[in-house]
Amino acid sequence: MTSLPPASPTGRAPSARSWLPSCLPSWFAILLFLLPFLLTFAVFLFSTTFPTMNLNLMTRPTQPDPRPDLTQKTTTHGTPIMNSAFEMKMDTILREIEIMKQKENQQQDISEMLQKMTKDLRCVKTEIDDMRVRVDSVDFESVSFDHRLDQETTEFSKQVADLQEHLLFTRGRVRALEDVSDTLQHQVTSIKNQPPPALTPTNTHLTPELIEAMGKWLRDRLAQDERQDVKQVVKDCSRPLADKMPNFALESQGGSIVTSRCSETYKTGSARVSFLGIPLWSPSESPRTVIQGQLVQPGKCWPFHGAQGSMTVALSHPVHVTHVTMEHISTAISPTGHIDSAPKDFAVYGMTTNSEEGTRLGTFMFNQAGDPIQTFKLPNPNSVYRYVELRILSNWGHQDYTCVYRFRVHGKMPSA
């Protein structure tokens, strides 16, 4: 069963066109009023958004449209009033657009300023971080320095305390020694002030036995002292003169050999080390052997080729050269019983530098039949020399080589 439509308030049945709104003419008039504005705004918006597009609307002549005469009376529904309102609206929109452009430019400037300020802020932050790192480093170094200072202060205080304790102990010992010294001094004084004991009658006379014993003791004592004195005199007389004077050529004292002014060392043919019959190493002594001050033994010498050669010694101090000493083994300890390789005639030269020719100080002869240690006095020991050159002029007959065992230079240092 179908329901019937409700009856109208007037009691009339609804007509066939009751579905249309009753205000249709007023809406239609409003739409007609707004249509030119909407179309013009759409064209303006399209031309602003797409200015490069070639539209028929934009290619028409740019002559300004004649403004409608608002004074004219027309029969249309309010067209001049609509154009005036549209122009006012357009002016308002253009002003708003200009304001928006200005605001956009301001916002762009503000954005650039913000970017610059952000960049500067980052730089400042980086500098602050660096400064913080430096401050932390300085703080760490300060703490480390304070720690080291505390350690050193503690150690120094400990050392001071130890020194004070040692000082107190030393003062105590000094006081004790002073007390002992005073006591001993007092005892010595009291002993000196005591009178000598009186001789008893039994000690006033010496018996013959006591007199004889005392005489024997005195004779033995005097004889023993005399023998010791004689031995000392003999010992002093037997000591060579070279051992009583300083040796300024001694290597251990500072003397040295000028190798550039020494003759070539003679090397024996026999090798001490060989391999498959091939000699690899043979012993030889250098000129240093002459000034090393070792005990003279057969073979412990510096040999050079032939009968003539030379060597230069840098003295330990500049001196007035007064004596020179030549030492060689004696015939008693020579394996062959003779010393024909010993130097015979030789000369001594003094130099202030090792590059000059030198001044002859004297010419001497070593006697092979004399003492093993022979000292020679220079005739004029006036000048001061730093270098001494020994020139061997001949030997005692050996054809192959000459041996120098020991050479000494004596003298006195110049007074300041």
Image (tube, helix red, strand yellow):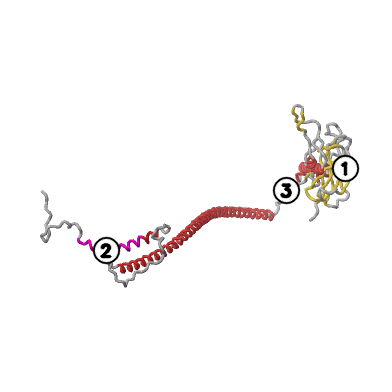
The image position of residue 336, as x and y in percent, is 85, 31
What's the amino acid at mark 2?
Ile
Disc 3, SS: loop
What's the amino acid at mark 3?
Pro
The answer to whether residue 239 shows anywhere in this view is no
Residue nearest the observer in this picture, 161 or 172: 161
Question: Residue beneath label 2, please?
Answer: 30
Q: Nearer the viewer, mark 2 or mark 3?
A: 2
In the displayed structure, 251 sits above or below 149; it is above
Question: Residue beneath label 3, please?
Answer: 201
What's the amino acid at mark 1?
Phe
| Disc 2 to disc 1: CB gap under 8 Å | no
Question: Residue beneath label 1, please?
Answer: 346
Task: Sort mark 2 into few (<14), some (14-19) or many (20+) by Cα contacts within 10 Å.
Answer: few
Task: Sort mark 3 into few (<14), some (14-19) or many (20+) by Cα contacts within 10 Å.
Answer: few
- Alpha carbon distance from label 2 to label 3: 181 Å
| Chief secondary structure of the magenta portion | helix
In the displayed structure, 125 sits above or below 253; it is below
Disc 1, SS: strand
In the displayed structure, 8 sits above or below 311; it is below
Confirm whether the magenta stretch covers residue 84.
no
The image position of residue 365, as x and y in percent, is 89, 42
> Along the polypeptide, which appears first: circle 2 or circle 3?
2
Quadrant (top left/top right/bottom left/bottom right) for the C terminus? bottom right
Part of the protein shown in magenta = 22-42
Relative to 17, 299 lies left or right: right
Residue drawn at point x = 75 percent, y = 29 percent: 274
Residue drawn at point x = 31 percent, y = 71 percent: 72
